[in-house]
Amino acid sequence: MPIKTERLIIRRVSENDRESIKNIWEDFNSSEFSKYDMPHSTKDEEVAERISRWAKTAEGTEHMFFAVCLGETVIGYIAFNKRENGYETGYCFHSAFHGKGFAKESFAALFEYLSSLGIKKITAGTALENKPSVALLKSLGFELIGTEKVSFYKDSAGNDIVFEGGNFELNM
């Protein structure tokens, strides 16, 4: 099932991707954008458990996890999870590969694949302050359909750290 683009190979996540995805999460956790997402544990046993769950979904369509590879290197991943009226997507790429069009290229190929499965609607959420993510979604044809207050972290006094999250939708 691998999908090949001009520069990338996109395939389902396997258990062998554990270290690569752990590396992507470590990189993400140190980025300025990590405050806009749920924390990613990088403890070996928790990473192994999560990637094992992802790999077990490789034949299904309810939860789909794709490794985006440049040659043999996993540079990011894209997930699609079935929701009531379509699928919700999430993604993360190692910062060394940001700004080079890899996410857009891989999404375009995956949209063709999803369309062949009869999937017609994709949603995504991101912080409006995460300008690169907002720009990616808009460049892919997603439209902002609403906003909401979101919090994943607390400050030193125990108060929620709140940001404005954007809800995006793409009808294919």
Image (tube, helix red, strand yellow):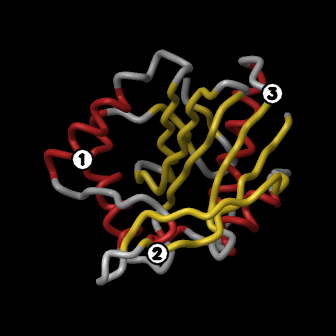
How many C-alpha atoms fall within 10 Å of the one at disc 1: few (<14), some, or many (≥20)? some
* Residue closest to the far bottom: 156
Is residue 14 found left or right of 131 in the rendered image? left
- Front residue of 132 and 8: 132
Residues at discs 1 and 3 in contact (Cβ within 8 Å): no
Residue 140, x across and y down, in percent: 80, 53
Q: Amino acid at mark 2?
A: Ile
Q: Nearer the viewer, mark 3 or mark 2?
A: 2
* Residue at image mark 2: 161
> Could you tell me which residue is drawn at 53 percent across and 40 percent down?
79
Give the label on residue 87, or none: none
Q: Amino acid at mark 1?
A: Val
User: Which element type, helix, strand or loop, lies under badge 3?
Assistant: loop
- Front residue of 22 and 87: 87
User: Which element type, helix, strand or loop, lies under badge 1?
Assistant: helix
User: Which element type, helix, strand or loop, lies under badge 2?
Assistant: strand
Residue 25, x across and y down, in percent: 35, 61
Residues at discs 2 and 1 in contact (Cβ within 8 Å): no
* Residue at image mark 3: 120
Q: Choose top left, top right, bottom left or bottom right for residue 54.
A: top left
- Front residue of 97 and 122: 122
* Residue at image mark 1: 47
How many C-alpha atoms fall within 10 Å of the one at disc 2: few (<14), some, or many (≥20)? some
Q: How far apart are labels 1 and 3 at the CA level? A: 31 Å
Residue 1, x across and y down, in percent: 55, 23
